[in-house]
Amino acid sequence: MVPSLATDAEVCAFVEANGAVNARLLRLTYAGPASGMTAFTWELESMQAHARLAAAWFSPAGVALQAKMMTADPASVPVSSALYNEIPL
């Protein structure tokens, strides 16, 4: 497995272990200037679940995972982060 994909799989496992569901990595194909980038997505049941996952990033396991991703020559670099809410129709 490509080193960045191994770390990406670890991130997906981490967020799912901390309350997320449907964690996945997507390749952005037709995305204008973002074409060719990859994006993590996952779903959370509620804002409380979001807060628990956010807190988990500062647990020993979360900090270790962040440190693994923030090397001098990282395999990937965060570009943006967003929170989307579903609007029931």
Image (cartoon, rainbow, N blue to C red):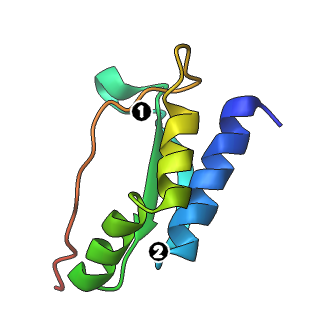
How would you rate the neighbour count of disc 1 (Cα within 10 Å): few for under 14, some for 14-19, many for 20 or more?
few
**Image-based side of 30 in relation to 68, left or right:** left
The residue furthest top is: 73
Q: Position of residue 4 (x, y in %)?
A: 66, 33
Q: Quadrant of the C terminus?
A: bottom left
Residue for badge 1: 30
Residue under the point 35% across and 85% down: 45
The residue furthest front is: 60
Q: Position of residue 54 (x, y in %)?
A: 32, 64
Q: Which mark, by number, is residue 41?
A: none
User: Which kind of residue does numbered mark 1 sit on?
Assistant: Tyr
Please count the marks in the image: 2
Q: Position of residue 39 (x, y in %)?
A: 45, 43
**Image-based side of 89 in relation to 81, left or right:** left
Q: Secondary structure at mark 2?
A: loop
Using the numbered discs, state the Cα–Cα distance from disc 2 to disc 1 in whole angstroms: 26 Å
Residue 46 image-quadrant placement: bottom left
Q: Which mark, by number, is residue 20?
A: 2
User: Which kind of residue does numbered mark 2 sit on?
Assistant: Ala
The answer to whether residue 78 is above or below residue 40 is: above
The answer to whether residue 33 is above or below residue 68 is: above
Q: Secondary structure at mark 1?
A: loop
Residue under the point 48% across and 43% down: 66
**Image-based side of 16 in relation to 57, left or right:** right
The answer to whether residue 72 is above or below residue 5 is: above
Residue 78 image-quadrant placement: top left
Residue under the point 18% across and 85% down: 88
Q: Which residue occupies the foreground of this view, 26 or 81? A: 81
